[in-house]
Amino acid sequence: MSDNQESVIKTCKSYYDSHDACIFYTEVWGGEEHHLGIYRRPEDTLYEASKRTIDRMASYSRNLKELKDKARVLDLGSGYGGTARHLAKTFGCRVVGLNLSETENNRHREMNREQGLDHLIEVVDGNFENVPYEDNSFDVAWSQDAFLHSPDRKKVLGEAARGIKPGGELIFTDPMQTEDAYAEYLDPILKRIHLTSMATPTFYIQAAQEAGLKLKSFENLQVQLANHYAKVLEDTIKMEDELRKKDVSQEYLDNMKKGLEHWSTGGRHGHLTWGIFCFEKA
């Protein structure tokens, strides 16, 4: 791994391990998720919309429907584990949550114990550029809005493909730039997430095919990206006083609001997109 790649990974880990980020995501998202949601009504909460995304993604998985409690799932970038718990409750499947933030992972394990799911979910400290499992170990590889943080997304897709069995599925979402995005809309976002580029849908499809995966479907949900970041910005403003009382710094909140506005604007004007990919390994 190059020095630049290590730097990006360390920066991401440091951010998600920080007090400000931990309190923000716990309070604003309800402590289960920090993934993009699918909104059906203006009054939908972040929690409701996030759960809708999980169910929509799961609807694409033949293996989850057929194997149920026999399925083994690898959740790449599992955060606080809301997805892992939802899948374990819904299908009875076993889930490995691979994630680089020790703070998130400790909370993930704690919530698994509280909800009586620690026998179905294993939480592993690590990153998805180097998945610590043998080839053909999982029926489903899953990820939500995490791959953009990698400086080597081709390697991430290759690791996911290596880890699933023949007939296994890779199902993921990720915020992306559109094929014809304008740099002036992307630059402030890239600066905030410490990256030089974002993927496009075409990039992911081609890279996954190079890794030996066949595209089953891609559901473009571009409008939901703008909906989501506008909703997070609205809730952040409403909860700002409460977050400050929990020692979230004003600098963090100001940067967060500015960043959310950039994401929302980029989505509304067609420079950013988001969607659900489903691939199958031959």
Image (spheres, rainbow, N blue to C red):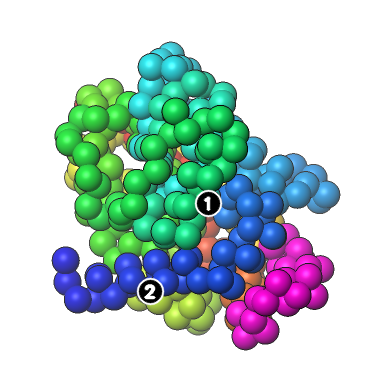
Image point (51%, 21%), residue name: 91
Above or below, 244 relative to 150: below
| Image label count | 2
Relative to the observer, which residue lies in front, 27 or 144? Answer: 27
Image point (70%, 72%), residue name: 246
In percent of width and height, residue 128 lies at 30, 52
Relative to the observer, which residue lies in front, 132 or 114? Answer: 114
Query: Magenta span: helix, strand or loop, mainly?
Result: helix
Confirm whether the magenta stretch covers residue 244: yes
Residue wearing tag 2: 11
Helix, strand or loop at mark 1: helix
Image point (56%, 26%), residue name: 89
Judged from this view, the residue extending furthest toward the top is: 66
The amino acid sitting under disc 1 is Arg
In percent of width and height, residue 84 lies at 49, 37
Residue wearing tag 1: 107
Confirm whether the magenta stretch covers residue 239: yes
Between disc 1 and disc 2, whose residue precedes? Answer: 2
Give left or right: position of 74 versus 225.
left
The amino acid sitting under disc 2 is Thr
Helix, strand or loop at mark 2: helix
Mark 1, residues whose alpha carbon is within 10 Å: few (<14), some, or many (≥20)? Answer: some
Magenta region: which residues? Answer: 230-252
